[in-house]
């Protein structure tokens, strides 16, 4: 009997017999479950491995090195303007960090339960897309 195509796009193909993602094929008969998991944004990219203190230390280091370079080139003395440098440096760092963190989005993972355990087979920032695929696969599993 020929396969019936249930869904297909550039990343995944779902038929009534199997799921194909890239070069991997998962026979529906070997799939016990399908679920969606959410992976939150990785803020360590913003905060650094040492956390907020490591991030702020690194940022202030950059501000002071930039000020020292400016002082060496233009004769502008950082000590005379330390309050201004710290204030503006802090404002720039905090606003930049907030903007980056707001723009970070969680990932949604399509997870299949197979004989060897649970496997994340596809990830996307688009929750509706992953939930739609999960629903299609669930329907295919029920119709087996």
Image (cartoon, rainbow, N blue to C red):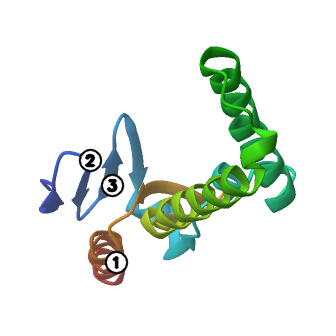
Residue located at (28% from left, 59% from top): 17
Residue 136, visible in the rendered structure: yes
Query: Closest to the observer: 126 or 97?
Result: 97
Would you place residue 34 above or below residue 97 in this image? Answer: below
Dot 2 alpha-carbon crowd within 10 angstroms: few under 14, some 14 to 19, many 20 or more: few
Numbered circle sitting on residue 19: 3
Which-is-in-front pick, marks 3 and 1?
A: 1
In the image shown, does 108 or 46 lie closer to the viewer? 46
Q: Which residue is pictured at 59% across the width and 63% down the height?
A: 91
Whole-percent x and y of residue 99?
47, 64
Which numbered disc, 2 or 3, marks the residue that appears first in the sequence? 2
Give the Cα separation between the discs numbered 1 and 2: 15 Å
- State which quarter of the image contains the N terminus: bottom left
Which quadrant is the C terminus positioned in? Answer: bottom left
Who's the residue at 84% across and 50% down the image?
A: 54
- CA distance for labels 3 and 1: 15 Å
Q: Are marks 1 and 2 in contact (CB under 8 Å)?
A: no
Identify the element where label 2 is drawn.
loop
Residue 93: horizontal and vertical position, in percent? 62, 56
Q: Secondary structure at mark 1?
A: helix
Disc 1 designates what residue? 131
Q: Residue at x 50, y 59 (%)?
A: 100
Residue on which the image places disc 2:
11
Residue 111 bears which disc, if any?
none
């Amino acid at each position: 009997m020929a396969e019936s195509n249930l869904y297909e796009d550039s990343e995944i193909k779902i038929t009534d017999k199997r799921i194909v993602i890239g070069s991997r094929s998962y026979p529906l008969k070997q799939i016990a479950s399908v679920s969606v998991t959410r992976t939150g944004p990785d803020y360590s990219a913003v905060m650094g491995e040492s956390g907020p203190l490591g991030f702020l230390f690194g940022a202030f280091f950059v501000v002071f090195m930039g000020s020292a370079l400016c002082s060496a080139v233009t004769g502008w003395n950082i000590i005379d303007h330390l309050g201004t440098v710290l204030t503006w440096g802090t404002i720039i760092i905090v606003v930049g960090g907030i903007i980056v963190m707001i723009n970070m989005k969680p990932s949604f993972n399509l997870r299949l339960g197979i004989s060897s355990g649970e496997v994340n087979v596809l990830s996307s920032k688009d929750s509706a897309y992953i939930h739609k695929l999960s629903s299609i696969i669930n329907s295919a599993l029920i119709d087996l």
